[in-house]
């Protein structure tokens, strides 16, 4: 396979324009060079290919079969390159805000709300990367890092830390499951399959104790390795899970409900950390917006 550095890019560009115009003179005018310069590039390309790409018919040019194949591919390739360059040029007026967040936070807190931030600050493009529980935050590649747990774990590596909220943990159920197995009192939740996450152990025990449910036996149910996978199982109606109420307040696009919203147990806190590469203006706007969303 031909290596990129071996490609005669100037000659290929001259050929692509000449093939589109069916004229060396027109190609020369478009490229801002002489007729002879274009002709020289075409000869160099044919020598490199070992094939003719044009045949002359009077004053015009006709593509050979190989020339036609090459022209079609190059035409699309240069069009794609032009589109990519135009996209990058348009971003000169935009600021990219790179954010890293735990997967569940990104999927169930940020994603459903992000359109509201972009509507308010249309000159900021938000790029989000996700991190699994236990993975070390990527400080160097992001402007803002969201963490769950103890702020001091990574606080010494970052500039500023803002407390976002402490989780209020409560059962989350799909509407379809609640229609099939309605709940009148907290103990009725035991009629549902209790879904758990390996990264969030002990949630059901803590909530059932807070709800005053006694003499129960936790068995069966579904267990998943990560919370966002477990919540997807809830969306499918496989059971209920204890999860942060903050992720599911208001109408849910996934048709999830909190059947006992007033019975909660405190979970861990979420923090926003700005990094040394961050522009504080944009980071502060995003953090203030998140706190505003939390307060709704």
Image (cartoon, rainbow, N blue to C red):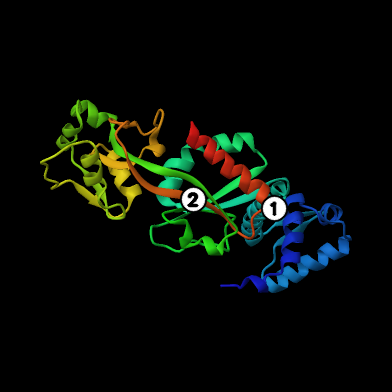
Question: Which of the two labelled residues, at mark 1 and mark 2, occupies the earlier sequence position?
Answer: 1
Residue at the spot 42% in from the left edge and 62% down from the top edge: 135
Badge 1 element: helix
Q: Residues within 10 Å of mark 1 (few under 14, many from 20)?
A: few
Residue at the spot 12% in from the left edge and 42% down from the top edge: 216
Residue situated in front as seen by the camera: 105 or 210: 210
User: What is the x, y in percent for residue 122?
Assistant: 65, 38
Q: Judge left or right: residue 107 versus residue 56.
A: left
Residue at the spot 50% in from the left edge and 48% down from the top edge: 163
Determine which quarter of the picture holds residue 64.
bottom right
The residue mark sitting in front, 1 or 2, is 2
Residue at the spot 77% in from the left edge and 50% down from the top edge: 21
Residue situated in front as seen by the camera: 49 or 254: 254
Badge 2 element: strand
Q: Name the residue under label 1.
A: 85
User: What is the x, y in percent for residue 274?
Assistant: 58, 54
User: What numbered label is drawn on residue 37?
Assistant: none
Q: Distance between the residues labelled 1 and 2?
A: 37 Å
């Amino acid at each position: 396979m031909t290596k990129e550095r071996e490609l005669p890019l100037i000659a290929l560009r001259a050929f692509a324009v000449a093939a589109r115009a069916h004229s060396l003179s027109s190609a020369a005018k478009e490229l801002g060079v002489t007729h002879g310069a274009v002709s020289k590039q075409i000869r160099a390309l044919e020598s490199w290919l070992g094939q003719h790409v044009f045949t002359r018919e009077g004053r015009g040019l006709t593509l050979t079969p190989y020339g036609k194949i090459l022209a079609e591919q190059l035409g699309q390739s240069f069009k794609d390159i032009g589109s990519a360059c135009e996209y990058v040029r348009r971003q000169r007026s935009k600021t990219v805000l790179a954010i890293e967040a735990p997967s569940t936070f990104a999927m169930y807190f940020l994603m459903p709300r992000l359109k509201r931030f972009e509507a308010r600050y249309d000159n900021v493009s938000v790029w989000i990367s996700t991190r699994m529980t236990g993975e070390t935050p990527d400080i160097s590649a992001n402007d803002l890092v969201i963490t769950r747990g103890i702020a001091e774990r990574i606080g010494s590596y970052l500039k500023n830390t803002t407390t976002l909220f402490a989780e209020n943990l409560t059962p989350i159920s799909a509407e379809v499951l609640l229609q099939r197995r309605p709940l009148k009192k907290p103990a009725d939740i035991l009629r549902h399959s209790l879904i758990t996450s390996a990264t969030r152990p002990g949630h059901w025990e803590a909530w059932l104790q807070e709800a005053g449910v006694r003499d129960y036996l936790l068995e069966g149910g579904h267990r998943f390795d990560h919370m966002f996978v477990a919540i997807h199982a809830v969306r499918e109606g496989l059971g209920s899970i204890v999860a942060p109420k903050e992720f599911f307040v208001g109408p849910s696009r996934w048709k999830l409900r909190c059947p006992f919203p007033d019975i909660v147990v405190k979970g861990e806190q979420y923090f926003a950390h700005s990094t040394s590469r961050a522009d504080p203006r944009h980071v502060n706007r995003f953090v203030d917006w998140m706190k505003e969303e939390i307060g709704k």
